[in-house]
Amino acid sequence: MRSEPDTTATTDWVPACAVARAVAFVPSEYLVKPASERWERREAMRLRRAVFCTEQGLFERDDRDALDREATLLVAVACVSGMPEQVVGTVRILESAPGQWQGSRLAVHPDYRRVAWLGSELIRLAVGIAHARGARQFTAQVQSQNVPLFRRLHWQTLEETELQGRPHHRMQAELAKYPPCTGTAGFVARRAA
């Protein structure tokens, strides 16, 4: 004879999807480097669309523009067992005039925004590479909610502006705080255990 389930019993039942999310694997090692592989560039563009088009609604279908043809694309790649697995952050840099560099389209996947300081590490690499390539000035248009991060990283506001209907700060990096970064390897960022 089959018995009916006891609906009066108290349990700490949790849906499987909640458990899976709570124990999701988070890599502990990230490569922060210039994009060198086709898949890295493709995934960086996909991440930018997800952040700037879908999440923030700054652009309708695509955020790519003419600067992408000349810009150096940097990526933060999550590694599993030491092997590159997923692009979780990106930024692009460009020399707009001799010695005048700019950074733009800084994006970090929402699940990784509080992991291993990836936004900060992308900024550090961006300015370091530009510094090594002769930058005398490095600027960026920074969304207002990100200004405190940039200030902690030794940036100062030059002016407040509005872009794509959102408040921004045109900011400048203090180059002396960013040692020149040469080569193509980038560096490894590790998440604290």
Image (cartoon, rainbow, N blue to C red):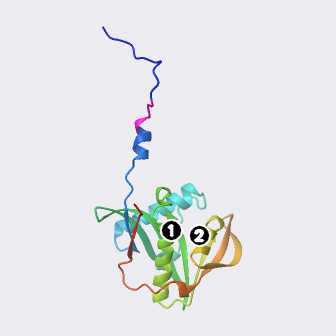
Which amino acid type is marked by label 2? Leu
Residue 93 % position (x, y): 50, 78
| Pointers 2 and 1 in contact (C-beta within 8 Å) | yes
Which residue of the protein is positioned furthest toward the top in this rendering?
A: 1
Residue 132 % position (x, y): 45, 88
- Residue corresponding to mark 1: 119
Which structural element holds mark 1? helix
**Residue 97 seen in the current view:** no
Determine the image quadrant of residue 46: bottom left
Which amino acid type is marked by label 1? Gly
**Residue 103 seen in the current view:** yes
Vertical side of 153 occupied by 190: above or below: above
- Residue corresponding to mark 2: 149
Q: Give me the residue at 49% from left, 77% from top.
A: 124
Q: Give me the residue at 55% from left, 73% from top.
A: 104
**Would residue 133 be found to the left or right of residue 140 on screen?**
left
The one nearer the camera, 45 or 127, is 127
**Would residue 148 be found to the left or right of residue 103 on screen?**
right
Highlighted range, magenta? 12-16
Judged by its main secondary structure, the magenta piece is loop
Count the labels in the image: 2
Q: The N terminus appears in which quarter of the rendering?
A: top left
- Residue 174 sits inside the magenta stretch: no
Q: Give me the residue at 39% from left, 47% from top.
A: 23
Q: Residues within 10 Å of mark 2 (few under 14, many from 20)?
A: few
Mark 2 to mark 1 CA distance (whole Å): 9 Å
Vertical side of 25 occupied by 48: above or below: below
Q: The C terminus appears in which quarter of the rendering?
A: bottom left
Q: Give me the residue at 55% from left, 59% from top.
A: 53
Residue 188 % position (x, y): 37, 72
Res. 183 mark: none
Residue 160 % position (x, y): 71, 74
